[in-house]
Image: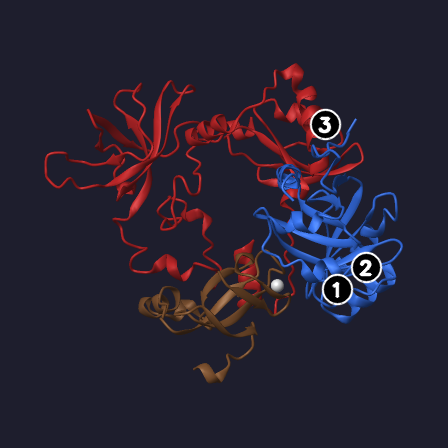
Amino acid sequence: MFLINCPFCGERDQSEFSSGGEAHIVRPKQPTELSDDEWAEYLFMRKNIKGIQFERWNHVHGCRKWFNIVRDTSNDKILSVYKMGEKPPVNYK
Amino acid sequence: MSKLEDYLQTEWPELDVYLTSVTDHYSTASICGPNSKKILNKLFPNLDLSDENFPHMSFKEDKLENINCRIMRISFTGELSYEINIESKYGHSLWKMCIEAGKEFNLTPYGTETMHLLRAEKGFIIVGQDTDGTMTPSDLQMDWIVSKKKYDFIGKRSLYRSDTIREDRKQLVGLLTDDPKEILEEGAQIVSDVKSKPIDMLGHVTSSYFSPNLNKSIALAVVRSGKTMKGQKLIIPMENKNINVTVSDTIFLDKENKRLNA
Amino acid sequence: MLDILHPNISNINKNNIDINLSEEKIKINIRGKNKEFFTKVGKILSIILPSESNTSSSNENYDVLWLSPDEWMIYFDENKNSNIFDQLYKDISSLNFGSITDVSSQLICINIKGENIFELLSSGSPFNFEKFKNNVGSSTQTIVNHIDVILHHKSKNNVNLFVRRSFSEHLYEWLVDSSNFV
Ligand SMILES: [Zn+2]
């Protein structure tokens, strides 16, 4: 269990949120132009790393807004929270 | 709705769209059967229920007393059916009015088991029971539902991945037991040969009932290359016996949809 | 002939907790972002929408709860201003300035008052009520006994809880039962 600082509602318990997996995967503009391998890369491939990961979360039992976090998966420390559409913080690249 | 909210906020935030759930704001009563038009006419005397004005798969708005209702002509039982939506605080009242109006036609409440049997006779699937997340409309022999005109929609590209166009995917079929009294177990495995080891598993039974309308056992199943197997004999191996079945069409009753327009 | 069926929620009073069904409340969900939206709402309701999270605005007719940066819920007694939905809908939804949705039957309002109510709510919720209970006018969405709720701190130790109709009787039973343990 950990706390997440929703960019809209403030600090809330993790149980109010749902995780949406890896962040910054952009849906291809023209899926019909892609090969099977390129489409599979978008659809299935996720990094799932031990360490610093960029993730999508949804405050599903609160304001229902999606946002991004930077989380160290090895110790569940949340290093940064930022809104959808905002650029990921560069210092964790 | 959470999937829609996800796409709206993260992929297409520029769209001028808001999503608000009204699931609990409405109650629905469904009236099914050849007399449903007559009952609906008693509840909504000003509504033109003719097939020209109110065909299958369309909806109308009207009032019950002074309360707004949405009325859909849609069917999950295969019978001529209407679904009435009303603000949920009036749901119980709507129910009582339907029962009252239906008395002279022997209207009776029916439960979900009845509904599931009736829809299986028609080969209507239950998503999650007859399908899982891997099945495509084509696997279900429902290619007609997919738009051929749209440049893109969610899931379109995945419909022609090399894996999704394989001919030997599991596909929806009907099964008829050689002994019409024998009812298959849902989830039972389907094979064509019990002698060779290991036994090659072709699929499984997804829905199974005894149909009083047809006086025989019917089942839906997903079977590898099932689309091309109509008439073929298959085997359902059970603990103490092997059950012989024949692959059939998925629609067991009223193929011509006569009942929908009764 | 069309009579209303309310959820089976009766008045309970124990351990300084008073639980009541607030039957006749209109609830309207409103969504919008642009200038026209805020102007129209302000004009029709004579109220400024709260822009700060977890807060509300009230006047003699309406309570407006912040739900998200572009979403609010208005609620008020049924016998007041019964045509306000139509007015909002006509001036906002119809003109595409935002979205107005009647959720009166979607949500049941359960009024909970008394000294021990925040202990009761805390016992089934991950939400930290410290700030909430000291600030009349606070509002929040959270979970109570695994059920989504909207809470409004209407006056001191007096909370209006909004819950989906289909969950309302179950949550009420939980509230009554849990009142024994605070
Ligand atoms: Zn939030």
Report in which chain the residue with disc 2 lies. Answer: C
Q: Which chain is blue?
A: C
Pointer 1: what residue? C97
The picture's colour for chain B is: red
| Left or right of residue A79, residue C95 in this image | right
Which residue is at the far bottom?
A91
In this view of the protein, which residue sits in the foreground, B157 or C59?
A: C59
Task: Identify the residue under disc 3.
Answer: B43
Label 1 lies in what chain? C
User: Is the distance from the Cβ of mark 2 to the nearest ligand 1 atom less than 8 Å?
Assistant: no
Q: Using a 10 Å C-alpha cutoff, classify the residue at mark 3 as few (fewer than 14 neighbours), some (14 to 19) or many (20 or more).
A: some
Q: Amino acid at mark 2?
A: Asp
Colour of chain A in the image: brown
SS for callout 2: helix
Dot 2 and dot 1 residues touching (CB under 8 Å)? yes
Question: Can you tell which of label 2 and label 3 is closer to the viewer?
Answer: 2
Q: Is residue C16 visible?
A: yes
Q: Is residue B58 above or below residue B155?
A: above
Tell which circle, 2 or 1, labels the residue nearer the N-terminal end.
2
